[in-house]
């Protein structure tokens, strides 16, 4: 990925099977249209290919369950809104995919245009968890969002929770994951966030706890993790930040605890501007480092900083 520096409410429709074909395509693929409000508890069919033909809205008090192996392909400009509960039960062998309709890498050529098109960021507006919504997402792959400024996955508001484990968030034209103004526990674990055009992950004014562990955040055009707001304070442990412009960017008086011991340390490698940047210069962060390696920018080990990563505005932060 090259980095540049910086409705109308539809009736719920789980339609009849569609069938697309075009001249030059070797085989047409079946799909099920999906759009509109979901007003009763619903489970999609495992292994089915769905086309998100209009914005879906999971109503408050309603649960949508998506079993392992299901594929949801979004038509350009659509969105997946949740005000109730979303359960995604993927597995390592059969993850659940949210992608865009031109992506033939999963579910085949379901739009029937052969090789005429290919997927791009900014295709659709991602999964949006409104205030009060909850989601448990296991082994989910969400790609090619960013439309209308929405990230691939967004959780906002004081009520409701997000549990994301074993996920992949990639190829957004904006941020991969956004969490804002939450007061309850949010969980991000064992997840890869990569190749997004803005931040990999952004957390704003989150006064509630956030469990952030064993994640890989790499090759995002701005920060791997952007943390903002004086109420935002949570531990960041056993994670890898590599190939971003900035590994972790901290602003607005936020106070995350980065690493803290050899067993909970984070790795920062190859972030081109800074490993960690604190825009409120002088605030200390408990990063587990060997002080001589920080001075010489030598070889990396778990929880250490390596060239070309630098730290700014974190006076007295390092504990050896």
Image (cartoon, rainbow, N blue to C red):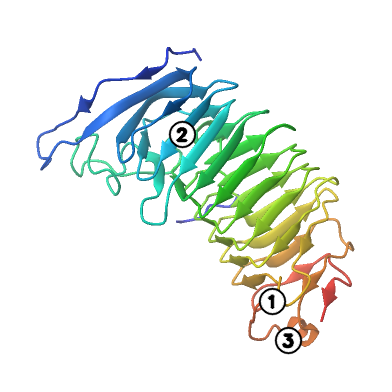
Q: What whole-number distance in Å separates the C-alpha atoms at marks 2 and 1? A: 42 Å
Figure check: 17 above or below 303:
above
Kindly state the secondary structure of the residue where label 2 is placed: strand
Query: Sequence-wise, which precedes: disc 2 or disc 1?
Result: 2
- Residue 105 position, x and y percent, is 29, 49
What residue does disc 2 label? Answer: 65
What residue does disc 1 label? Answer: 305
Kindly state the secondary structure of the residue where label 1 is placed: loop
- Which image quadrant: the C terminus? bottom right
Q: Residues within 10 Å of mark 2 (few under 14, many from 20)?
A: some
Figure check: 174 above or below 42:
below
Query: Sequence-wise, which precedes: disc 2 or disc 3?
Result: 2
Residue drawn 30% across the image and 36% down it: 49
- Residue 79 position, x and y percent, is 48, 29
Q: Nearer the viewer, mark 3 or mark 1?
A: 1
Q: Is residue 78 left or right of residue 158?
A: left
Q: What whole-number distance in Å separates the C-alpha atoms at marks 3 and 1? A: 10 Å
Q: Can you tell which mark lies on residue 296?
A: 3
Figure check: 296 above or below 281:
below
């Amino acid at each position: 990925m090259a980095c540049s520096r910086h409705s109308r409410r539809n009736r719920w429709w789980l339609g009849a099977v569609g069938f697309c074909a075009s001249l030059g395509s070797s085989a047409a693929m079946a799909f099920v249209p999906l759009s509109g409000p979901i007003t009763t508890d619903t489970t999609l069919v495992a292994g089915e290919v769905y086309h998100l033909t209009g914005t879906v809205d999971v109503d408050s008090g309603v649960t949508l369950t998506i079993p392992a192996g299901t594929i949801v392909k979004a038509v350009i400009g659509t969105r997946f809104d949740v005000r109730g509960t979303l359960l995604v039960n993927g597995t390592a062998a059969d993850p659940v995919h949210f992608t865009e309709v031109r992506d033939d890498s999963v579910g085949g050529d379901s739009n029937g245009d052969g090789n005429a098109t290919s997927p791009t960021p900014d295709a659709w507006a991602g999964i949006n968890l409104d205030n009060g919504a909850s989601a448990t997402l296991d082994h989910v792959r969400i790609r090619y969002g960013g439309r209308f400024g929405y990230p691939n996955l967004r959780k906002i508001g004081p009520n409701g929770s997000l549990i994301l484990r074993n996920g992949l968030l990639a190829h957004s034209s904006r941020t991969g994951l956004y969490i804002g103004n939450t007061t309850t526990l949010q969980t991000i674990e064992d997840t890869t966030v990569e190749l997004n055009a803005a931040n990999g992950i952004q957390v704003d004014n989150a006064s509630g706890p956030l469990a952030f562990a064993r994640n890989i955040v790499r090759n995002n055009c701005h920060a791997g993790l952007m943390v903002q707001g004086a109420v935002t304070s949570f531990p960041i442990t056993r994670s890898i930040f590599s190939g971003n412009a900035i590994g972790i960017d901290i602003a607005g008086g936020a106070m995350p605890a980065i690493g803290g011991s050899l067993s909970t340390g984070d790795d920062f490698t190859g972030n081109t501007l800074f490993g960690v940047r604190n825009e409120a210069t002088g605030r200390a962060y408990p990063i587990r480092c060997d002080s001589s390696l920080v001075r010489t920018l030598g070889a990396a080990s778990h929880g250490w900083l390596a060239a070309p990563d630098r730290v700014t505005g974190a006076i007295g932060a390092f504990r050896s």
